[in-house]
Image (cartoon, rainbow, N blue to C red):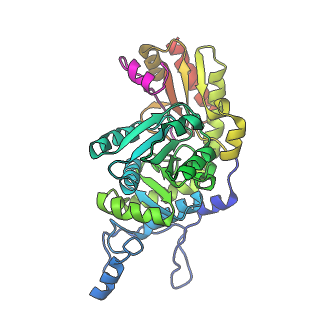
């Protein structure tokens, strides 16, 4: 894993005001206020002319939230960041801020399910979409239409963690005048910086690794100043899915340990994945370290995180459940990216058609490897495999 020392400093150091005696707090204070008052009405009216830059009401700007936004923008090498009350609030703000009736969206790679659910709802308002599962830029180009306005990518993608060629996607978008956006949650801005590869918009579910402790739900979007103004006034300010100051403070706390946590997540996850790969009861392991083009990974990623999946041989629903139910350290639950290990399957008793439509195999189990230690977690998955045999 390679992490830029400047990014480590950005994660740890807060921009805080010094007190009169020169002392400075080591953590940014929580500005727990809903509004700001002004000495004159004229002062307030003047600030309304640029609400995206001024403190008026915390549904718009708040100092604690801005500190988190400053850090994420710096880590992604972007001009502007807005934080949201959830990852889906961030996704919806991008869609509502940059799209209109008649526009078309292409999704590339396996995509987070609720993101696709949202765009299907947007079909009621005249926005159409297609999903391209084949990781071939020619296939992506074939799916574009004259009305395509957005290409949305995940890399590594949901559930199978396949890696797309981001520079090639960004170049295709530029050549056709189409905005490119990516959900960069899996890799975090410490290990992948899509804006430097030519992407226009980066989105994060900050609930995952950025928060890192499973105690806050949040999202973030990073882009250039012009696009952010559209997102701010057309979606963010009106949707109301804003991040609370205390939640922003929790995220700032999470960022301080992010570099150290990622190193441990990577090490432990690779150990568990390697163990599974060598077990005859496992059909396949889906981890970018084993399944992606090494040259492509080297070009666009500087390390791995702790989430991957594997396929049980003859993995019917009952067998998958026996595996999951036997685990002791891995808890059964949704989400990922916290200090605790989690396990989940998309499989149900009667959803074979849905799995096939999304390109997912039977017997698939997703693991989020936490900080309990590689040796103990290897023992835990071995316990599960024995129960499923």
- The residue depicted at 64 percent of the width and 58 percent of the height is 8
Residue 385 forms part of the magenta stretch: no
Q: Does residue 112 lie above or below 388 as drawn?
A: below
Horizontal side of residue 53 vs 137, given as left or right: left
Q: Quadrant of the N terminus?
A: top right
Q: Does residue 134 lie above or below 252 as drawn?
A: above
Position in image of residue 228 (x %, y %)? 44, 63
Q: Inspect this view and state whether residue 194 appears.
A: yes
- Residue 119 vs residue 360, the one in the foreground: 119
Residue 344 forms part of the magenta stretch: yes
- The residue depicted at 42 percent of the width and 36 percent of the height is 130
Horizontal side of residue 125 vs 266, given as left or right: left
Q: Does residue 172 lie above or below 12 as drawn?
A: above
Magenta stretch in the rendered image: 338-362
User: Which image quarter: residue 131?
Assistant: top left
User: Which image quarter: residue 129?
Assistant: top left
Magenta span: helix, strand or loop, mainly? loop
Position in image of residue 62 (x %, y %)? 39, 69
Position in image of residue 6 (x %, y %)? 67, 62
Horizontal side of residue 96 vs 180, given as left or right: left
- Residue 334 vs residue 192, the one in the foreground: 192
- The residue depicted at 33 percent of the width and 74 percent of the height is 56
Position in image of residue 206 (x %, y %)? 47, 51
- The residue depicted at 42 percent of the width and 33 percent of the height is 333
User: Which image quarter: residue 73?
Assistant: bottom right
């Amino acid at each position: 894993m390679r992490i830029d020392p400047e990014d480590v400093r950005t994660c740890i150091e807060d921009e805080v005001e010094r007190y009169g005696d020169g002392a400075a707090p080591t953590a940014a204070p929580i500005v727990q206020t809903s509004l700001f008052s002004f000495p004159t009405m004229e002062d307030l009216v003047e600030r309304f002319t640029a609400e995206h830059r001024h403190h008026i009401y915390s549904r718009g700007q708040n100092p604690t939230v801005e500190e988190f936004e400053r850090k994420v923008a710096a880590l992604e090498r972007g001009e502007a960041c807005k934080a949201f009350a959830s990852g889906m609030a961030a996704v919806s703000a991008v869609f509502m801020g940059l799209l209109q009736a008649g526009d078309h969206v292409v999704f590339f790679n396996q995509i987070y399910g609720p993101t696709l659910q949202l765009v299907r709802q947007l079909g009621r308002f005249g926005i159409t979409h297609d999903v391209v599962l084949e990781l071939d830029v020619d296939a992506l180009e074939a799916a574009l239409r004259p009305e395509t306005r957005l290409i949305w990518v995940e890399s590594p993608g949901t559930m199978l963690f396949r890696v797309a060629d981001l520079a090639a996607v960004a170049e295709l978008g530029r050549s056709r005048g189409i905005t490119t956006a990516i959900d960069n949650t899996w890799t975090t801005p410490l290990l992948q910086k899509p804006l430097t590869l030519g992407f226009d918009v980066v989105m994060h579910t900050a609930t995952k690794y950025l928060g890192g402790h499973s105690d806050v739900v949040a999202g973030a979007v990073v882009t250039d100043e012009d696009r952010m103004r559209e997102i701010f006034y057309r979606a963010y300010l009106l949707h109301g899915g804003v991040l609370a100051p205390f939640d922003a403070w929790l995220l700032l706390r999470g960022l301080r340990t992010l570099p150290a946590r990622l190193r441990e997540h990577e090490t432990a996850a690779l150990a568990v994945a390697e163990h599974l790969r060598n077990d005859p009861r496992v059909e396949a392991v889906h981890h970018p370290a084993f399944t992606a083009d090494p040259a492509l990974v080297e070009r666009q990623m500087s390390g791995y995180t702790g989430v991957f999946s594997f396929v049980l041989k003859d993995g019917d629903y009952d067998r998958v459940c026996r595996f999951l139910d036997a685990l002791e350290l891995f808890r059964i639950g949704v989400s990922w990216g916290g200090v605790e290990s989690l396990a989940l399957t998309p499989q149900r008793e009667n959803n074979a058609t849905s799995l096939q439509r999304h390109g997912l195999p039977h017997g698939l189990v997703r693991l989020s490897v936490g900080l309990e230690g590689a040796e103990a977690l290897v023992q835990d998955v071995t316990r599960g495999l024995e129960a499923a045999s």
